[in-house]
Image (cartoon, rainbow, N blue to C red):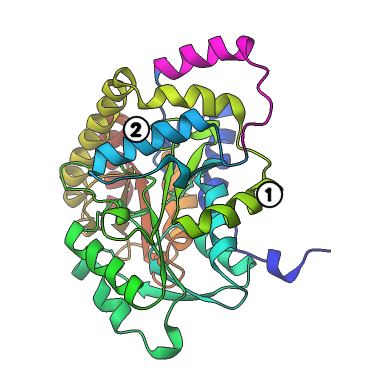
Amino acid sequence: MASQRSQVQPFRVMQMLDRVQRRRRAGRDTIMLCAGQPATGAPSAVLDLAERELRASPLGYTEVVGDRELREIVAGWHSSTYGVTTPADNVIITTGSSGGFVAAFLAVLDHGDTVALSCPGYPAYRNILEAFGARIVDLVCDDSTRFQPTAAMLEALPAADKPRAVIITSPGNPTGTIIDPSELERIARWCDANGAVLISDEDYHGMSFGRELATARQFSDRAVTVGTLSKYFSMTGWRVGWLIVPDELVTPIENLQASLALSPPAISQVAGRAAFSEAAKAELDGYVADYRRVRDVLLEELPKIGLGHFAEPDGGLYLWLDVSSVTDDSEAWCGKLVEEIGVAFAPGIDFDPVHGNGWVRLSLCVSPSDAREACRRLGEYLGR
Ligand SMILES: Cc1ncc(COP(=O)(O)O)c(C=O)c1O
């Protein structure tokens, strides 16, 4: 019964998460380094507001493009964080950023259009784009550019591969590396000069361990930027994200979203207003400091057990680790690790269909002591 277009790759990380849940239900100790989400909950200010609003509001559909107050708050936060002018009219609230990608891809691309993506990269872009009939051009990234695409890579594409859209992710998933503002500016200028729409996934903004983070809109008001409450704001299951789009895309996306979603979830939008408060920021910045501590443990411990080649995370939630010296089938290897030593990693093949069999993604959403224990168990396993 299933269509051709639905034949996309499974999201193996989610399968690994299910496996960990089953093990934990059976009482089997498992250190979960595979999750793509904070282990923390929503900030207290959000919970307080949600409790009040649950009884006070009818919580029907909001405006199609999102709760006006939240749009204004996101616009104000974006403007003050990056020193840009972001009008609330250009902010569209979506059902997670995932809902935003679907709407943005439909608004920008026609069947058969070419899209340039970094490889390794976040698998859902590829899966959605394949289902939509887009043609994907991989921008293959390695240590030489800190696992991020560059304007030079776009420049070098043959004419037949000139993209209609370019997707970038900084901090990256699975790499955690950040594109320098000067390179982001070059990428944005290349896109403008070559008629490509730059779609900048800024979902992990707020999570830098020191390196400067720029938004694509500092360099082009033709760029589409994507944000979410799922990562820095620690509200994964609330399903709120946003797009900041050029004037000419506001109405097409509004019309698409009207039919795709009617509106994003009301309680999450209303309560989400408090995620941008000073009180929430203090809590959330504390979590970023925790991720940094976990990163430091991994940077110290992994080389000691012979796994010293990785993308060093500048921020975000992950570390991308080369395990090609010990396996050429990271999915099977991750399966063995979880069963034999109770440590769950995300197999790299999700993120890089070419070289991913020699890589795994580690999540920073654990305690420093669990990260250290996972490295100890892995070291022992590799030494056997
Ligand atoms: C790079 C990237 N973009 C988008 C998403 C989607 O997040 P959400 O729909 O929760 O906003 C994720 C989730 O892991 C991600 O890693």
Left or right: residue 179 versus residue 26 is left
- In this rendering, the answer to whether 170 lies above or below 378 is below
How packed mark 2 is, by other alpha carbons closer than 10 Å (few <14, some 14-19, many 20 or more), is many
Q: Quadrant of residue 368?
A: top left
- Please tell me the numbered disc located at residue 260: 1
**Which amino acid is tagged 1?**
Leu
For this view, does 84 lie left or right of residue 270?
left
**Mark 1 and mark 2 residues within 8 Å of each other at the beta carbon:** no
At x 30%, y 74%, the residue is: 190
Taking the magenta stretch, the answer to whether it contains residue 47 is yes
Residue 14, position as x, y percentages in the image: 55, 46
Please tell me how crowded label 1 is: few (under 14), some (14-19), or many (20+) other residues with Cα within 10 Å. some
- Asked whether 187 or 283 is in front, the reply is 187
Is 101 part of what is drawn in magenta?
Answer: no
Q: Main secondary structure of the magenta part?
A: helix
The mark closer to the camera, 1 or 2, is: 1
Q: Is residue 378 left or right of residue 144?
A: right
Question: Can you give x and y, in whole percent of width and height, for residue 343 in the image?
Answer: 41, 41
Residue 366's label in the rendered image is: 2
The stretch of residues the image draws in magenta is 44-63
Give the quadrant of residue 128: bottom right
Closer to the chain start, of discs 1 and 2, is 1
Q: Residue 21: x and y, percent? A: 56, 34
